[in-house]
């Protein structure tokens, strides 16, 4: 857990409890949480392997600079890798709710806080201008909620 926490350490632990139950007290819940975390890590490692293979082919063709369509998997954070449909979006929404609850009004700019609230209110269904804002800002913005919003909206990784 100290090395792989795809949506942040506290959010990952909280989401695992949401998925598996109170794993601190029940062995079966702990095993379910461990299985979910291992499955996410395996999906992430598969994505990393695909990225490495693509980059190796590109480099052999003389393209030394990676394309602008995103960083290597896991570099940005904020995405729960899974083979189960809708699980990444659920994880992202869970993390956004924790972020909104735990951070004061001065922690982020008004636009970011507004995007977080809209994403939570719509269950991750962002379209039009709000989604365009997230996609435009996320590449150059180090703000943790932006990759989570993109993941909740189904546009990541």
Image (cartoon, helix red, strand yellow):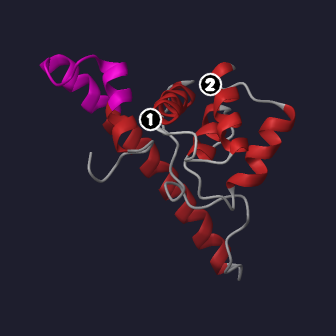
Using the rendered image of the protein, determine whether residue 157 is visible from the camera's viewpoint. no
Q: Residue at x 53, y 55 (%)?
A: 73
Q: Residue furthest right?
A: 128
User: Which label sits in the foreground, 2 or 1?
Assistant: 1
Pointer 1 residue: 102
Q: Quadrant of residue 12?
A: top left
Judge the density around disc 2: few (<14), some (14-19), many (≥20) Cα neighbours within 10 Å.
Answer: many
Q: Quadrant of residue 58?
A: bottom right
Instruction: Say if mark 2 contacts mark 1, CB within 8 Å.
Output: no
Q: Residue 88's spot in the image, x, y percent?
A: 53, 32
Residue 108 vertical position relative to residue 153 in the rendered view, above or below? below
| Residue 114 counted in the magenta span | no
Q: Residue at x 63, y 43 (%)?
A: 156
Q: Is residue 59 left or right of residue 29?
A: right
Dominant secondary structure (helix, strand or loop) of the stretch shown in magenta: helix
Pointer 2 residue: 120
Q: Which residues are magenta?
A: 14-36
Which sits in the foreground, 61 or 112? 112
Residue 75 vertical position relative to residue 13 in the rendered view, above or below? below
Q: Residue 9's spot in the image, x, y percent?
A: 35, 44
Disc 2 is placed on an element classified as helix
Residue 22 vertical position relative to residue 7 in the rendered view, above or below? above
Q: Quadrant of residue 93?
A: top right
From the image, which quarter does the N terminus lie in?
top left
Q: Residue 76's spot in the image, x, y percent?
A: 54, 56
């Amino acid at each position: 857990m100290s090395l792989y926490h795809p949506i942040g350490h506290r959010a990952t632990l909280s989401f695992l409890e949401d998925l598996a139950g109170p794993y601190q007290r029940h062995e079966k819940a702990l095993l379910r949480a461990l299985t979910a975390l291992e499955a996410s890590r395996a999906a992430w490692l598969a994505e990393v392997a695909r990225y490495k293979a693509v980059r190796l082919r590109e480099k052999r063709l003389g393209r030394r600079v990676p394309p602008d369509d995103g960083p290597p998997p896991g570099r940005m954070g904020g995405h729960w890798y899974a083979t189960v449909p809708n699980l990444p979006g659920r994880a992202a929404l869970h993390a956004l709710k924790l972020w909104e609850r735990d951070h004061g009004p001065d922690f982020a700019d008004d636009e970011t806080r507004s995007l977080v609230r809209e994403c939570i209110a719509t269950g991750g269904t962002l379209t039009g201008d709000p989604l365009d804002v997230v996609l435009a800002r996320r590449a150059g913005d180090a703000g943790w909620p932006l990759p989570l919003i993109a993941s909740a909206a189904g546009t990541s990784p």
